[in-house]
Structures are given as structure tokens and as C-alpha cells.
Amino acid sequence: MERKSRKIQYDYLRVIAVIAIIMVHSIPAETANNRQWLFLAAILPVLLSFVGIYFMLSGLFLLDHGTENILAFYKNRLCTIVIPFGFYTGVYYIYYKVYLGEDKLSVFTHVKNWFLDWLTGSVPMAPHLWFMYVILAFYLCAPFLARMLRCMNDHELKIFLVMIFMIQSIQVYLPPLHLLTEEAFQYMIFKGWLIYFVLGYSLKRLFHNSRYLPFAAVGLAGFAVTMFQKCFTPLFTPGIHDMAPTMIGMAACIFMFFEQYADVSIPGITNAFGLVSRHSYSVYLIHYLVLGQLSTAIVEKTWIRHFYIPKILCLTALTFLISLAVSWLFDETILKLLKRIPDFIWKQGKGR
């Protein structure tokens, strides 16, 4: 019963999502021939759809429940999101600015520089952390957005989804056609990555028991249009990844597949996915450092480096396993202690 209440399909989806993101970063930017180019063109849209799925999973849980007590919600996010985020940015800073850095600075100066890098999103050699600033913005809004969505009936929620989807489509496709819309929509609130955050909650609420075939058709159509753009209209590929309507369709297709068919417990495998899922956030944060400074160096010393797809798979697997080990070590030691600090302060404040 406990495993069932955990909704294990989300553990599967979360683990596959973090592996997909690691694979994205393991793929070389350059291709040597047409076969490599075709593989890259086909696999990237599928892998990148999991970026949106990350937001969908967050929205699914936060907008459905857990935001009733606003102060408690923010306290919980501080412990589970902000503190690990700050810690891992510190790991990047220490490695690149202290260990590899040539400037001899005081401890106070390093701490100040790390804090400023963290606030401004300029942590050295950690471009993947842009994701965190988006998700933190959503967390700030989540208690109020959740109240708004829960007050809508299903019909109103469908109208809302259509509206933000249309706004996103306009912003993706009209500017490349020189039909500039930025002035008209720059103050629009419901746009960008927010559509994924809302979509996870909305799909589960509205279509949990619906037929899967329409979602499969939408996902395949999104993939087909993306490949058509890449192969036949390479000069017109606006928003082909990230927030393009085609990408939204693929993300919805994958999400609903797991929602409807993946709530299946498999002895051993389910427990393993649950374990990895609990550390997947830290794996995401640390994997870029592991990939760039350790996995790549190891693989480049082997015969696998000469083979395009085996090298990508090997880099992905090695980075994932090392990142998981490092994440488990940090999560169960330093971060466990750091997360107790807000609880201690909270209790001290209540005792006065």
C-alpha cells in the first residue's frame, strides 16, 4: 500500500528524465557524417522534451496539494531545494575558482564571490543551472497559482490551457516571420516555461482516465514536424526545442504514457528507481561537473572514444553512476546536516 501511494510511475519518469538530460550533455556538438547528424536530429527532441517534463512533475505535485500552509511550504522548499542548490553551486565554485583558480583570495572574498555568482546565475562552468532559477520562480508563485487553478472548473481550466498554448505558439512562430509580437506580449504573465508547470497538473486532472491514443498522435505529430523542419526547412526552425508547440506535444505524450501505463511495481527495479529518484535532484545539479571533469577524461582513454553512439552511451552511464554515488554521499552527510539548520532556527523562533 505504501508503494502504491507513492505513485511509482513518477519515480520511473523522474529517473529517466535525469538520464535523458545527462545524455543531452554527453552528445558532441559536432557531427562527422550524415548518419551522425540524423541520429542527433532525431534523438535531441525526445531527450529535450524531458526538460519540460521536469517542470510538469513539479507542477503536478505543487499545484495539486502541499501549498495550503504558505509559510510551511516556503520553509520546506528552503530545505529541499534552496540549500542543496546553494551547496552544489559552492562545489562548482570551489572546484573552478579555488582548486583550479590562480588568484589568491581570502576566504571572505571567495564566499562573497560565490554568493554573488549564485544570485546572478553566473556560477563557473555550470550552464545547466539556468533551470533552477526558473523553477525557483515557479515555487515562489506556486501557493497562489495553485489556489487560482483549484478555483477553476474543468471547462475553465481547458480554456486557460488553450489560451497559454496560443500565446506560446504566437511567440514562437510569428517573430521569425517578421510579425513582431514582443511589444504586445512582453507583459503577458502566462507564457514561457510556465506552460509546462501548469500542464503537468492540468493533464492529470483533466485527462487521467482519457484514451491515450490522442496524446500518442500529438506526440508523433510533434516529432514529425520537428524532423521535417530540421530536414527540409533548416532556415525556419523557430523554437524547435524547449517551448515550441511541437515539443510541448512530445512532452505531453511521454508524460501521459507514464501516467496511464507505468504504475506497475517490479520487484527490485521499483526499489532501485525509488532510491535514485530520491537523489535525482542532486544528480542533476552535480552531473555537469562529473561529465566535464571525470567521465570524459576516462572515456577518452578507451577505444570507445572512436565510436559515436557507444561513446555517448558510455559517457551517459558513467556520468550517471558517478553522479549518483557523489549525490548519495553528499545528501546523506553534509546536506542532511545543513537541512537541519532551518528546522533548528524555526523551533528556536517558536520557543520565544
Image (cartoon, helix red, strand yellow):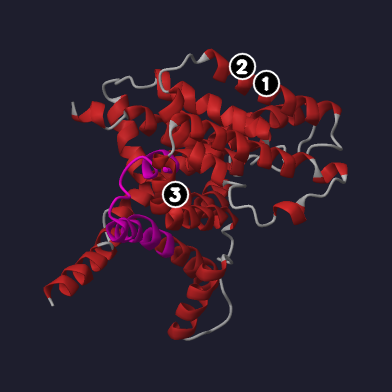
Are discs 2 and 1 less than 8 Å apart at CB? yes
Q: How many marks?
A: 3
- How far is mark 3 from mark 1, CA to CA? 31 Å
Q: CA distance from mark 3 to mark 2?
A: 30 Å
Separation of marks 2 and 1 at Cα, in angstroms: 6 Å
Q: Secondary structure at mark 3?
A: helix
Q: Which residue is mark 1?
A: 221
Picture residue at 54% right of the left edge, 67% below the top:
96
Left or right of 331? Residue 237 is right
Q: Look at the image and give the residue range highlighted in magenta.
A: 58-86
Question: Residue 4 sits in which quadrant?
Answer: top left
Residue at the disc numbered 2? 217
Q: Amino acid at mark 1?
A: Ala
Identify the amino acid type marked 2.
Ala
Position in image of residue 280 (x %, y %): 40, 44
Disc 3 vs disc 2: which is toward the camera? Answer: 3
> The residue tagged with tag 2: helix, strand or loop?
helix
Residue displayed at 27% across by 25% down: 268
How far across and down, in percent of the image, does residue 9 sit? 37, 27
Which type of secondary structure does the marked residue at label 1 adopt? helix
